[in-house]
Image (cartoon, rainbow, N blue to C red):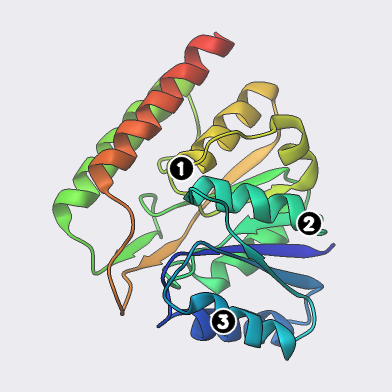
Amino acid sequence: MKTSLIIPFKNEKEYAELTMDTAYSYMSEKNLNFELIAVDDSFDGTWELLKLFQASHENVVVIKGGNPPGYGKALRQGFAAATGDILIPFNGDLCDSLDDVMSYIQHIENGYDMVFGSRYMEGGKILDHSSAKILLSRSGNAFLQWIFNAKCTDLTNTFKAYRRKVLDAVNPQANGYDLGLEIALKALTIGYKYTTIPVIWSARLYGTSKMSILRSMFSHLRTGLAIRFTYS
């Protein structure tokens, strides 16, 4: 099966080449059938670095993001361009683990339609993140897990893996960080087979995060409630 890694960037000049090279080298060393889809919403020179990387590597697609930009919008552009059987969003600041990507692929190949990663289950880890943000995130996730009776303690985590048919069936519309939640919850209501595995999340080394935890949790809860009432 072919894997498409969808990597959104927004003003990540410090990370662009590092992330692409790290992901490309890892997946090549694992002898995977893969492609990297980079979607860029930047104005700091990230685009030029991505284009240079594309010019010297096979199986790399670089796409200019929309206007206005958006995290979810960038992922949807990547999904549309991807040719793989397995689609995995992967953050451009290397906060996600490529070892976990490998685990995702193995679980999909073993028959699951989706694989969710949880930072909050046994074996999961968050490295170098504030306790206040973790508490807020865990509280919101506990509520969503309860109202959907889901076997996942980290539904808001966008780092998940999907078979292509899931994306085709769900047809996600979110433009923000709630896109991953929208896909997961709609797919759960349809009845796609999934599992949850522990994953490791690491804080970025350079620059600052583009995500506001308060704004993000509000949008996640709004999306979750909208889906709950629509499909109830």
Q: Amino acid at mark 3?
A: Glu
* Structural distance between the alpha carbons of marks 1 and 3: 24 Å
Which quadrant of the structure image shows residue 107? bottom right
Q: Amino acid at mark 2?
A: Glu
The percent position of residue 75, horizontal first and vertical second, equals: 59, 52
Is 71 on the left-hand or right-hand side of 103?
A: left
Count of numbered badges drawn on the protein: 3
Judged from the image, the secondary structure of the residue bearing numbered disc 1 is loop
Judged from the image, the secondary structure of the residue bearing numbered disc 3 is helix
Q: Amino acid at mark 1?
A: Gly
- Residue highlighted by disc 2: 109
- Residue highlighted by disc 1: 176
202 shown above or below 58: above
Q: Residues within 10 Å of mark 1 (few under 14, many from 20)?
A: some
Q: Residues within 10 Å of mark 2 (few under 14, many from 20)?
A: some
Which quadrant of the structure image shows residue 106? bottom right
Viewer-nearest of discs 3 and 2: 3
* Structural distance between the alpha carbons of marks 3 and 2: 35 Å
Is 186 on the left-hand or right-hand side of 119?
A: right
- Residue highlighted by disc 3: 48
Q: Which badge, 3 or 2, comes first in the chain's sequence?
A: 3
Q: Residues within 10 Å of mark 3 (few under 14, many from 20)?
A: some
Placement of the N terminus among the 4 image quadrants: bottom right
Viewer-nearest of discs 1 and 3: 3
Q: Residue furthest left?
A: 132
Of residue 126 and residue 34, the one placed in the foreground of this image is 34
The percent position of residue 87, horizontal first and vertical second, equals: 70, 55
Judged from the image, the secondary structure of the residue bearing numbered disc 2 is helix
